[in-house]
């Protein structure tokens, strides 16, 4: 009575195998870059205000 579960796991496995590693790496890089950009903006704002 369950034809879908046999098809769904394949799609889920494809999503898990292909996308997550790429997304995780890209998202980590984006988070690090965004974090660094925010720090740079904050430090630049502080330095400009102080100067």
Image (tube, helix red, strand yellow):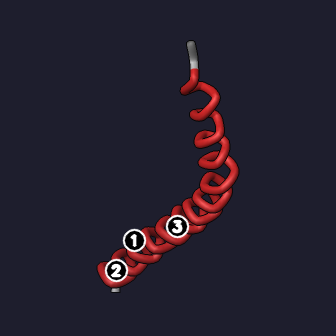
Of callouts 2 and 3, which one flags the residue occurring earlier in the amino acid sequence?
A: 3
Q: Secondary structure at mark 1?
A: helix
Q: Residue at x 58, y 58 (%)?
A: 23
Depth check: 17 or 37 in front? 17
Q: Residue at x 64, y 48 (%)?
A: 14
Depth check: 29 or 23 in front? 23
Of callouts 2 and 1, which one flags the residue occurring earlier in the amino acid sequence?
A: 1
Image coordinates for residue 50, horizontal then vertical, percent: 34, 80
5, above or below 22, in the image = above
Check whether the beta carbons of the residues at disc 2 and disc 1 lie within 8 A of each other: no
Q: Residue at x 40, y 80 (%)?
A: 44
Quadrant of residue 51 in the image?
Answer: bottom left
- Which residue is disc 3 drawn over? 30
Q: Nearer the viewer, mark 1 or mark 3?
A: 3
Q: Residues within 10 Å of mark 3 (few under 14, many from 20)?
A: few
Q: What's the mark number on residue 42?
A: 1
Q: Secondary structure at mark 2?
A: helix
Cα–Cα gap, marks 2 and 3? 29 Å
Of callouts 1 and 3, which one flags the residue occurring earlier in the amino acid sequence?
A: 3
- Which residue is disc 2 drawn over? 50
Cα–Cα gap, marks 2 and 1? 12 Å
Depth check: 34 or 23 in front? 23
Q: Nearer the viewer, mark 2 or mark 1?
A: 1
19, above or below 45, in the image = above
Instruction: Name the residue at the top extreme.
Output: 1
């Amino acid at each position: 009575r369950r034809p879908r579960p046999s098809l769904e796991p394949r799609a889920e496995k494809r999503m898990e195998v292909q996308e997550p590693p790429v997304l995780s790496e890209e998202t980590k890089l984006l988070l690090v870059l965004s974090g660094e950009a925010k720090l740079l903006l904050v430090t630049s704002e502080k330095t400009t205000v102080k100067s």
